[in-house]
Image (tube, coloured by chain):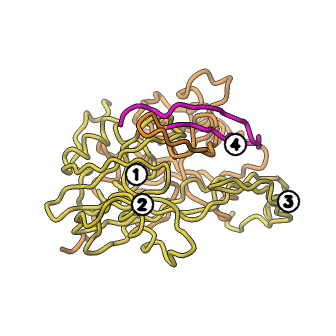
Chain colours: A yellow, B orange
């Protein structure tokens, strides 16, 4: 059950602003079963947990058209070809979206947003020693509010559903593995 | 900065097997800036952390065409119209994909897979007292291997990147908040 399916054909169906859609026809080497899969192609994404020298986490708040409301997240975006590597993309997004620059970035985890039908990965960085050095320089249409929150407050926002973006939750999972905000969260245990 | 953008027009661009794409033109009430957004419409999704009476976690392993390889995940899928509610969808997916039924399901968290351009949410359930009661009944083309793992082993799979699906990582984040596998993960802390 380890062998990947063999792709018989792959056809670009449509190209949109932030992703493309293709149809892959492939066959299982174990059963011979053939199936056509709809695949969403995007560049890799990055996100960043910026931490100030005082230990505050830098969050952003912006309108998100998928959800149709403002959401609290961390800085992030797509890796551009000119970024070269994901860490550079993370550094760029941090600066553009918040005006902050960090002393150093540490890769703390990578997830696949949805391996069932998306090709890309999302790389998470902890940006240590983040301080504001410039004005924000967001993409057209991006109106981004920057807020600093203590680890305790971030913990509350994760537990009470203020932070809902799956990739941000995953980012704080990695942060938690390293001793950050989340592991100390104390909610009622599941009753037996 | 709290008012949602006003949608001026919304147009279905394409419909695919598992999602549709639409273009929304909307305007910021704060700045008057107009922008067209590409939006991915899907049903809500669910996933389930099944736990056996012995405290094992039930995982599945299957080929994922987005990633192009087999991945280790937890049971889950889309909420069908006939499910009525997400918890029923979770119960159905658990049974279809693993042949397990649980004594009870508890909603432990909800995330948005990507509020930037996806409309849907993913609801996570803990399925307590899960035992195998039937053969698997997967969708055509689904070949699903079922494995039981201790919380320690799940913890290792999360920390070492065996489990990479963002929505599964988020699910174990909620599980961790309730005292499950992850909070005891001990990796090297970030060096200062």
Residue at (71% x, 68% y) in the render: A3
Residue at (42% x, 38% y) in the render: B53
Q: Disc 3 marks which residue?
A: A32
Seen in the image, is B145 located left or right of residue B59? right
Q: For mark 4, name the chain.
A: B
Of label 3 and label 1, which has the lower sequence position? 3
Q: Disc 1 marks which residue?
A: A168
Q: Disc 4 marks which residue?
A: B21
Q: Can residue B63 be seen in this view?
A: no
Labels 3 and 2 share a subunit = yes
Q: What element carries label 2?
A: strand
Magenta extent = B1-27
Choose between A38 and B180: the one closer to the eye. A38
Residue at (29% x, 61% y) in the render: A50
Whole-angstrom CA distance, mark 4 to mark 3, is 32 Å
Q: Is mark 3 on a helix, strand or loop?
A: loop
């Amino acid at each position: 059950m380890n062998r990947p399916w063999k792709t018989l054909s792959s056809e670009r169906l449509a190209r949109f602003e932030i992703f493309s859609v293709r149809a892959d026809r492939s066959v299982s080497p174990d059963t011979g079963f053939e199936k056509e899969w709809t695949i969403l192609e995007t560049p890799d994404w990055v996100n960043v947990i910026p931490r100030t020298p005082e230990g505050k986490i830098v969050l952003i708040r912006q309108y998100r058209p998928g959800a149709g409301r403002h959401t609290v997240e961390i800085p992030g975006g797509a890796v551009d070809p000119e970024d070269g590597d994901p860490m550079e993309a993370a550094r760029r997004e941090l600066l553009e979206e918040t005006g902050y620059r960090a002393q150093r970035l540490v890769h703390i985890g990578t997830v696949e947003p949805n391996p069932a039908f998306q090709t890309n990965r999302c790389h998470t960085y902890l940006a240590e020693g983040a301080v504001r050095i410039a004005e924000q320089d967001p993409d057209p249409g991006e109106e981004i509010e920057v807020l600093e929150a203590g680890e305790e407050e971030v913990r509350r926002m994760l537990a009470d559903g203020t932070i809902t973006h799956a990739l941000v939750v995953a980012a704080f999972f990695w942060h938690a593995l390293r001793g950050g905000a989340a592991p100390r969260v104390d909610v009622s245990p599941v009753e037996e």
